[in-house]
Image (spheres, grey):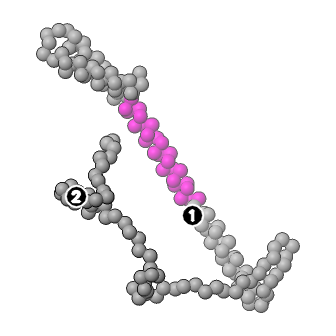
Amino acid sequence: MKLYELSDSYRLINRRIEETEGDETGEDIVLKAALDSIEDAIENKAQAIIIMAKEWEAEAAALKEEQDRLAKRRKTLENRAEGIRKYLLSQLVLASLQKLKTKLFTLTVNPAKDSVVVDDIELLPAEFVRTKKEPEKVAIKKALEEGQVLQGVHLETGQPSLTVR
């Protein structure tokens, strides 16, 4: 039986027990035994699901570790490539070579471009500064919970969560 089928059966039997509570029939005993049996089956399914989830989490962690290792390796190679390009540029500038043709490439030394360096952002006029507008969600939640009415926001109940110990 699938977990969702077990959950449905458990809910229906539990409802039937509540309806017949106080009756002196043997049905109550049979229903409680069925409920216990379904609960055992749900426990087994839940345990199997958590084991599967933990295996996937372990595999994901291993992949993350490998991803981090590969990212570090990629960064090292990118830095090497940048360093050797800077070395070549410095040697071409030192030799006063503006253009160099090889069998595979044509290299050109381009003049330096101007770039902006901000020494003190506080001294800049507002038209030259970007401001990021962001809601203060913690303060908003507290205000809403205290009964304050705010336009443009509302509280929404999220999904229940599962704790595994």
Please tell me the numbered disc located at residue 138: none
Q: Is residue 54 magenta?
A: yes
Instruction: Give the vertical position of 164 relative to 92 (above or below).
Output: above
Structural crowding at the residue carrying mark 2, measured as other residues with C-alpha within 10 Å and reported as few (<14), some (14–19) or many (≥20):
few
Residue 157 at x, y = what percent?
A: 29, 46
The quadrant in which residue 161 appears is top left
Instruction: Give the vertical position of 58 relative to 73 (above or below).
Output: above
Looking at marks 2 and 1 on the same chain, the residue that comes earlier in the sequence is marked by 1
The quadrant in which residue 37 appears is top left
Which callout, 2 or 1, points to the residue nearer the camera?
Answer: 2
Structural crowding at the residue carrying mark 1, measured as other residues with C-alpha within 10 Å and reported as few (<14), some (14–19) or many (≥20):
few
Residue 125 at x, y = what percent?
A: 42, 86
Q: Residue placed at 46% from the left, 82% from the top?
A: 128
Instruction: Give the vertical position of 90 relative to 45 (above or below).
Output: below
Which residue, given by chain and number where applicable, does mark 2 sit on?
Answer: 149
Magenta stretch bounds: 45-70
Which residue, given by chain and number where applicable, does mark 1 sit on?
Answer: 72
For the stretch drawn in magenta, the main secondary structure is: helix
In what quadrant of the picture does the C terminus appear? top left
Judged from the image, the secondary structure of the residue bearing numbered disc 1 is helix
Structural distance between the alpha carbons of marks 2 and 1: 49 Å
In what quadrant of the picture does the N terminus appear? top left
Residue 151 at x, y = what percent?
A: 28, 59
Residue 68 at x, y = what percent?
A: 53, 59
Foreground residue among 103 and 83: 103
Q: Given the current orientation, which residue lies at the most extreme right position?
A: 103
The reply to whether residue 35 is visible in this rendering is no
